[in-house]
Image (cartoon, rainbow, N blue to C red):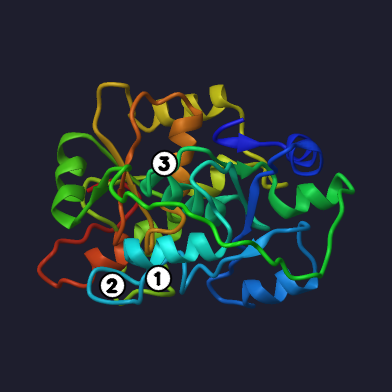
């Protein structure tokens, strides 16, 4: 089932298994409304809501708008959500899977391998007419131990090196990559040498992930090979996690590195160069 799970498989495991998976609802929109509002309106029975800004991220600081959470805080979040070391965890959002991929990545970074993204997210669950509830979850406290560092992470210097010697994938839209539009950060453009790989191209209009062969073909066209160092970044490290997941689905042999601070970190230093236009630069 890893790293994706279908609604059919989740339903069979959730309602028929001796030890059902822990389900995490991580719906989030950068411009709002708050994901908790969507959760309160209806969610998968037993799902625990986690907030992207305050739980899937640390406080904004030098180094990015959505830095990685402190490992101790992340462990407390997961334990409060009922996650045990032996549990399978399923995460979902209500979009293209990119926010769920952030939760997937954080669990993998924490050393927990038994985690999957719900393919198609909440929309697919509803379309399949599986049960939905407004009752808040009441999980028993878990015992998971976070062992951070199980997924590769880069800083700005590391990202620049991958851009020179490998393939640094920029997961943002073409408009933000080129510098034509920058709605969030103070400087527009991209890391010199980075290749544009918009995360939205990894899923179909219904939010379901493309098949491995199609993803592999796309990454090959972007210059990714099994021997080339590869890393991903986005605006603040959220949606770039979905590129790491897509590379895994495509059969890339090693986990791609994540530039956790992403563009919000890179552009914060006026001494760092910025490229504009549709070419890597």
What secondary structure is marked by label 2? loop
Figure quadrant of the N terminus? top right
Mark 2 touches mark 1? (CB < 8 Å) = yes
Q: Nearer the viewer, residue 103 or 20?
A: 20
Residue plotted at (85% across, 48% down): 127
- Nearest to the eye among marks 1 and 3: give it: 3
How packed is label 1: few (under 14 Cα within 10 Å), some, or many (20 or more)? some
* Quarter of the figure with residue 165: top left
Give the labeled residue for mark 1. Answer: 182
Q: Residue furthest left?
A: 271
How packed is label 2: few (under 14 Cα within 10 Å), some, or many (20 or more)? some
Query: Whole-Å distance between the Cαs marked 1 and 3?
Result: 23 Å
Residue plotted at (55% across, 35% down): 3
Q: Is residue 189 visible?
A: no
* Quarter of the figure with residue 276: bottom left
Indicate which disc, 2 or 1, sits on the residue closer to the N terminus: 1
Q: Nearer the viewer, residue 86 or 171?
A: 86
Q: Nearer the viewer, residue 19 or 11?
A: 19
What secondary structure is marked by label 1? loop
Q: Which mark is residue 192?
A: none
Q: Position of residue 60 (x, y in %)?
A: 33, 76
Q: Which mark is residue 187?
A: 2
Q: Which mark is residue 244?
A: 3
Indicate which disc, 1 or 3, sits on the residue closer to the N terminus: 1
Left or right placement of residue 133 versus residue 74 in this view: right
Determine whether 213 is above or below 17 in the image.
above
């Amino acid at each position: 089932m890893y790293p994706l799970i279908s609604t059919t498989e989740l339903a069979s495991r959730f309602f028929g298994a001796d030890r059902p998976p822990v389900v995490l609802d991580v719906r989030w929109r950068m411009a709002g409304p708050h994901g908790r509002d969507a959760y309160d309106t209806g969610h998968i029975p037993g799902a625990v809501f986690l907030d992207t800004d305050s739980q899937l991220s640390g406080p904004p600081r030098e180094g990015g708008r959505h830095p990685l959470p402190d490992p101790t805080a992340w462990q407390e979040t997961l334990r409060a959500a009922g996650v045990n070391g032996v549990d399978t965890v399923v995460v979902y959002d209500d979009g293209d899977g990119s926010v769920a991929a952030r939760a997937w990545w954080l669990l993998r970074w924490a050393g927990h391998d038994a985690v999957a993204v719900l393919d198609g997210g909440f929309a697919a669950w509803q379309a399949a007419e599986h049960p939905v509830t407004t009752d808040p979850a009441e999980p028993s406290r878990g015992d998971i131990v976070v062992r951070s560092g199980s997924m590769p992470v880069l800083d700005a210097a590391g990202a620049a090196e991958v851009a020179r010697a490998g393939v640094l994938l920029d997961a943002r839209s073409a408009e933000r990559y080129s510098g034509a539009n920058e709605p969030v950060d103070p400087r527009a453009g991209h890391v010199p040498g980075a290749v544009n790989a918009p995360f939205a191209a990894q899923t179909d209009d219904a939010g379901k992930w493309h098949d491995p062969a199609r993803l592999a073909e796309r990454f090959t066209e972007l210059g990714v090979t099994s021997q080339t160092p590869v890393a991903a970044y986005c605006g603040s490290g959220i949606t770039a996690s979905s590129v790491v997941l897509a590379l895994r689905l495509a059969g890339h042999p090693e986990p791609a590195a994540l530039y956790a601070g992403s563009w919000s970190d890179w552009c914060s230093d006026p001494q760092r160069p910025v490229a504009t236009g549709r070419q890597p630069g």
